[in-house]
Amino acid sequence: MQLRLAPGTDVHAETEVRRSRFVTVLRRVADEDGARALVTEARRARPDARHHCSAFVVEVPGSNRVERSSDDGEPAGTAGMPMLEVLRGAGVTDAAVVVSRYFGGIKLGTGGLVRAYSDAVRAALAGAALVRPEPLGLWAVELPHGEAGRVQAELHNAGVVVHDVVYGSAVTLTLATDDGDALAARLAEITSGEAEPHAVGSTVVEHPC
């Protein structure tokens, strides 16, 4: 199951391991450019940090997801990849994370670095609000003004998401559901067969975890 960060502000966390300070910023991003922008911002915000290690996972519609990581001067495989593995393990996508390290004068060793960077990302995820995206089909149906309110209420009570409402000579409801056949049957039932939905696209609805 894929998860995303809830829309909103960045998630911040700070951890310390043997005098080294790890400052983590976790952000929801829409593409690779957004992920790289977070790295640039971290470098500007904390220029005195020795390392700005990063990882991101971004979905590309119609293609494979993009995953990247950077050790930024730490020994190879001790920072970026462990950070990426934490994102993968949590099932989080469309997210970027940067961990800025202030060296405390004590070397942590390869294993210590892996644990420190992994724990830094886990700390940020622990404070993050997550949502579960659900792809749904969009269906439009036209209704007389006098019937629209009742039908909309009954559909809502049945768990159908009303995505949009447009008022004109008739009322057009755009409905989001994962079962078009069930929607058609429900509409036929509550409108005595007068209303028929037509597929008009798709959307993604996000549910809090």
Image (cartoon, grey):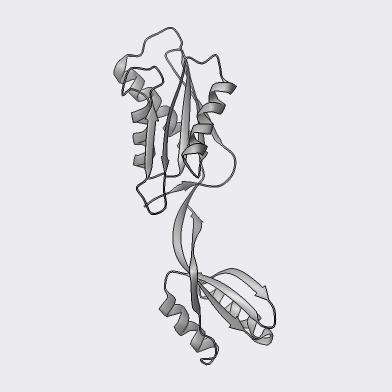
Pinpoint residue 2: horizontal percent, then vertical percent.
Answer: 39, 50
- The picture places residue 176, in percent across and down from the top left corner, at 51, 69
Q: Is residue 9 left or right of residue 24?
A: right
Depicted 184 relative to depicted 134: above or below: below
Q: Residue at x 51, y 45 (%)?
A: 129
Q: Residue at x 69, y 79 (%)?
A: 168
Which of 201/154 is in front?
Answer: 201
Left or right: 3 in relation to 165? left
Residue 89, given in percent of the width and then of the height, sits at 34, 40
Determine whether, in the image, residue 196 is placed left or right of residue 116.
Answer: right
Give me the residue at 54% from left, 22% from top.
Answer: 43
Q: Residue furthest bottom?
A: 192
Residue 178, by quadrant, is: bottom left
Residue 9, compared with residue 172, is above or below; it is above
- How many numbered marks does the figure carry? 0
Residue 162 in view here: yes
- The correct choice, above or below, for 163 with respect to 93 in the image is below
- For image coordinates 38% across by 30% down, the residue present is 69
Q: Position of residue 54 (x, y in %)?
A: 43, 28
